[in-house]
Image (cartoon, grey):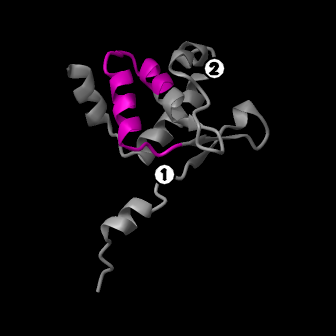
Amino acid sequence: MPFILTRESILSAEDLKPFPVDVPEWGKDAQVLVRRLDGSGRKALMNAISGLKEDTEIQRAVAVHCIVNQDGSRVFTDTDADLLAKKAGNVIARIADAAFDLNRIGKTAVENIEKN
């Protein structure tokens, strides 16, 4: 029989652990941590990408919102997306893809935002 969760067990579950993404282009054995977004973080990300048209802009915004330090705090601020434009596009795309996968944000969700 399955274990049915209670309110308390759901609210106390550690479900926001970050996920490491390899970035060997930035150093030997280098990784960044990509965070799982909570409800407010997901809303902030969706708002940030809502007016963006190009895939590279969206990828940079996702990286800015999802790369975190070991303590879970964001590495970048919202205004740092332009700085990431100077980094390798394939690396930013890899990080964004990991964030999309980890947070179950699919292409359809992004397309719907772009339409509005």
Look at label 2 and name its amino acid: Lys
**Identity of the residue drawn at 46% across and 20% down:** 56
- Is there a contact, CB below 8 Å, between mark 1 and mark 2? no
In-image side of 44 versus 96 (left or right):
left
Magenta stretch: residue 38 in it? yes
| 109 or 8, nearer to the observer | 8
Q: Is residue 5 above or below residue 10?
A: below
**Residue 51 place in picture, x, y as percent:** 32, 15
The answer to which quarter of the image holds residue 58 is: top left
**Residue 86 place in picture, x, y as percent:** 62, 14
Q: Which residue is under mark 2?
A: 87
Mark 1 / mark 2, whichever is N-terminal: 1
Classify mark 2: helix, strand or loop: loop
| 31 or 45, nearer to the observer | 45
**Residue 103 place in picture, x, y as percent:** 40, 45
Seen as rendered, the residue at the extreme bottom is 1
Magenta stretch: residue 49 in it? yes
Total marks shown come to: 2
Mark seen at residue 7: none
The answer to which quarter of the image holds residue 91 is: top right
Q: Which residues are magenta?
A: 35-61
In-image side of 53 versus 85 (left or right):
left
Q: Main secondary structure of the magenta part?
A: helix
Q: Which residue is under mark 1?
A: 16
Q: Is residue 51 above or below residue 110?
A: above
In-image side of 20 versus 27 (left or right):
left
**Identity of the residue drawn at 59% across and 26% down:** 76
Look at label 1 and name its amino acid: Leu
**Identity of the residue drawn at 64% across and 39% down:** 69
